[in-house]
Image (spheres, rainbow, N blue to C red):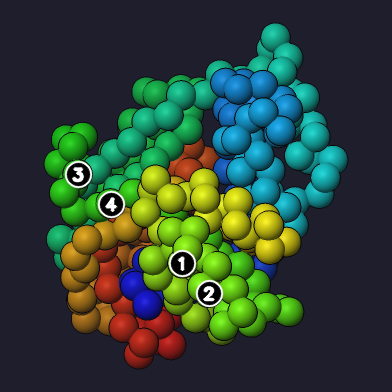
Amino acid sequence: MSGHSKWSTIKRKKGANDARKGKIFTKIIKEIMIAAREGGGDIDTNARLRLAVQNAKGANMPKDNIERAIKKASGADADSYVETTFEGYGPGGIAVFTECLTDNNNRTVASVRATFNKLGGKLGTNGSLSSLFERKGVFTISKEGISMEDIELDLIDAGAQDFEDDDDTFTITCAMEDFGSVNRKLNELEIEPEEAGLKRIPNTTKTLDLESARKVLRFIEVLEDDDDVQNVYHNLEITDEQANEL
């Protein structure tokens, strides 16, 4: 299992508290709003919105919250968000790729730069990490009521490349161009992912000692707590022993 997947598992377990769940809801609502703003409020004709709503349901967001976000995005006074990214290195030379949705780019730049500067990171130029990360489709599904043996071949035929077995979930990875076909196959199998999307997967990873890994994860956590930050990707390889400690 990749370090990033282990960190995702740690986040899911930490995400049970109300404060963390509120942050998750805020990020999902922003994704729903920008998807509805760009492609309209009909999930049948707007693939990005359909995926955002799917992720909202996977995070147990109340239906009313989802509907309000779509309705608000359709209004004349809706917030206007833009997508921006930051690339650089965190403590220990760990590569970090940050995706943001913001209605105030100056605020976001200042905030992200401050986090890098204060916590031992160094911002680079956009494109500097292009060779270190590859965009892939990633699906997280609950194990409840599912036998991977029964569906694995169907998913491979649809383009799935890798399967990871966690305590209570399966993670399925595919090439970016096969994301749609794997998503459709899951729908055909009546499996609704807890989370699905295109993510930046590191081509190479780096291991650090436990204390250095703690500093990196603290750095990532501070970035993720920024209201303008949607996703943070890194190439830290977390060992099984470190995952247990963390």
Apparent side of residue 33 relative to residue 203 in the rendered image (left or right): right
Compare marks 3 and 2 and give the one earlier in the sequence: 3
| Cβ atoms under marks 2 and 1 closer than 8 Å | yes
Answer above or below: position of 97 versus 11: above
Q: Which mark is residue 134?
A: 4
- Mark 2 residue element: helix
Q: Position of residue 171 (x, y in %)?
A: 50, 69
Residue underneath mark 2? 152
Q: CA distance from mark 3 to mark 2?
A: 31 Å
Quadrant assignment for the N terminus: bottom left
The answer to whether residue 168 is visible is: no
| Cβ atoms under marks 3 and 2 closer than 8 Å | no
Amino acid marked by disc 3: Ser
Q: CA distance from mark 2 to mark 4?
A: 23 Å
Amino acid marked by disc 1: Ile
> What residue do we see at 47% from left, 63% from top?
157
